[in-house]
Amino acid sequence: MAIALIFVIIFSYLLGSISFSYLIAKKIRKVDIRQHGSGNAGATNTLRVLGVGPAVAVLSLDILKGIAAVWFGVLLAPDNMGVFPALAGFAAIIGHNWPIYYGFRGGKGVATTIGVLATLVFLPALIAGIIAILSIIFTKYVSLGSLIFVIGTSIVTFIMGDYPDAYFYLTIVVALLSLWRHRTNVQRLLSGNESRIGQKTK
């Protein structure tokens, strides 16, 4: 069991470490996405630097790698306690944030987190996701929507209480990680200096 769990974590981390934002930017513009826009290797910065099409591709692929990691954990799980898929999903998120292939400089893991949480706790993620999308539509702040999604998913999962403990604990850890990764965004939101969709990064 221990060997299988280690294998799941390593595989999921390596999968999560694939930066589609970096790869697509290199393919289309021959640039390092981390040296342009906000410097973040993710879908939002891809939108700023490359446009809608590449951003949608990055978002979709990053979500898919989160889904794939969780299902890999499910397939190798020896029981239904949820530990394998939860740790697999978390490893994929860590890989996206700190990818071994790119000097441990990655994105903030929002899209991969969406894939992980939507697979593990679909209904809470859906409810929080709808609220997050509405907040982005009305405020144009992607960072705010991202934080609403992860925090909201954790809250709704707790309220519903119909999931393995490992899933609930994962939502808390992911929310805390996302808050830390978005700490500069939070500061800009509070000061009114956060960039909105369509604006250049400040």
Image: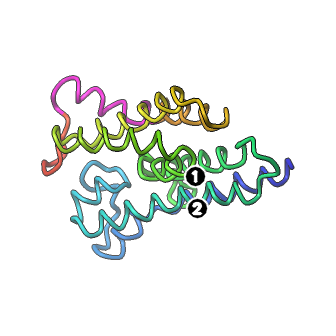
Query: What count of labels does the image hold?
Result: 2
Looking at the image, residue 202 lies above or below residue 76: above
Q: Quadrant of residue 126?
A: top left
What secondary structure do most residues of the magenta stretch adopt?
helix
| Residue 179 located within the stretch drawn in magenta | yes
Q: Secondary structure at mark 2?
A: helix
Q: Secondary structure at mark 1?
A: helix
Q: Which mark is residue 6?
A: none
Q: Crowding near pointer 1: few (<14 within 10 Å), some, many (20+)?
A: many
How far across and down, in percent of the image, does residue 196 sit? 17, 43
| 82 up-or-down from 33: above or below | above
**Residue 138 appearing in the image:** yes
Q: Is residue 142 left or right of residue 97?
A: left
Residue at the (16%, 40%) spot, across then down: 138
> In this figure, which residue is indicated by the disc labeled 2?
68
Amino acid type, mark 2: Ala
Range of residues picked out in magenta = 178-193
Where in the figure is residue 166, as x and y percent of width and height?
67, 36
Q: Residue at x 24, y 41 (%)?
A: 134
Q: Residue at x 28, y 45 (%)?
A: 133
> Looking at the image, which is closer to me, 160 or 28?
160
Q: Foreground: 132 or 108?
A: 132
Circle 1 or circle 2, nearest the eye: 2
Asked whether the beta carbons under mark 1 and mark 2 sit within 8 Å of each other, the answer is yes
